[in-house]
Amino acid sequence: MIKATFKLEEEFLSKGYKFIIGIDEVGRGPLAGPVVACAASIRTSDVLFGHPMSKEFELIRDSKMLSEKQRESLFDFIAENFYVGVGICDHRTIDRINILEASFLAMKSAVSQLKSKIKNLDNSKLIILLDGNKKIPNFSFEQRAIVSGDKIVKSISAASIYAKVTRDRMMGEMHKIYPEYNFAQHKGYGTKIHMDALKKHGPCEIHRKSFRPVRKCMV
């Protein structure tokens, strides 16, 4: 199993960077609900440069490799040990500007929220580490895109967990409003249960009308 580490964070810190910000998003693929991005930067160097890590730090990895219970258990721990910012783009924005652009916008919002929590961030040497192969366009900060970054870079892993839990909780609330779609189970992804509900009831308010499977179910 691939293990996420703080090696890249340590490398940049040793080069004089003060903040290393991991970014990941969740929710590009679903047919309903928002796309959520998180920016996370470790608060302390106590667990870096070979220092022993707690079991919680050891457990931080790609959110897809953790159970829902494990992700929930790490949510507050990440909030306490990382500076965290969250950006959300709803279904309306996704339909208006497309999912990729909405993902970038959510990432920018996540960094903006993170900046509000760290004094003098603009005057500090920092770098953003992104999961994937695309950098955020029209963004002034130094960036590095890392393929499978959520699997190998702890800060990106932490961001992936925090974003996943945030979005799952939102979809749980949507389930209460639209129980006929069972959002609490599939979180808006195009499972058979979801598709059957779409065909039976048609799209609801939070469905992404620009997505082809949803358009096919529109009256």
Image (spheres, helix red, strand yellow):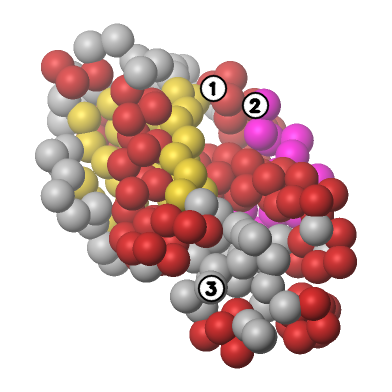
Q: Give the foreground label among 3 and 2.
A: 3
Q: Mark 1 or mark 3: which comes first in sequence?
A: 1
Q: Earlier in the sequence, mark 3 or mark 2?
A: 2
Per the image, the residue denoted by label 1 is 81
Residue located at (76% from left, 66% from top) = 186
Asked whether the viewer can see residue 123, the reply is yes
In what element is the residue under mark 3? loop
Q: CA distance from mark 1 to mark 3?
A: 38 Å
Q: Residue at x 33, y 49 (%)?
A: 105
Neighbours of disc 1 within 10 Å: few (<14), some (14-19), many (20+):
some
Type of secondary structure dominating the magenta stretch: helix
Q: Residue furthest top?
A: 119
Q: Amino acid at mark 3?
A: Lys
Mark 2 touches mark 1? (CB < 8 Å): yes
**Percent of width and height locating residue 188:** 68, 66
Q: Which residues are magenta?
A: 61-76
Tell me which corner region of the image, top left, top right, bottom left or bottom right, holds residue 115: top left
Mark 1 or 3: the one toward you: 3
Mark 3–mark 2 Cα distance, whole angstroms, equals 36 Å
**Which of 79 and 199 lies nearest the eye of the viewer?**
199
| Residue type indicated by callout 1 | Asn
Crowd around label 3: few <14 · some 14–19 · many ≥20 (10 Å): many
Please provide percent x and percent y for residue 214: 60, 80
Residue 22 appears in the rendering: no
* Residue position for label 2: 77
Q: In the rendered image, which residue does mark 3 sit on?
A: 209
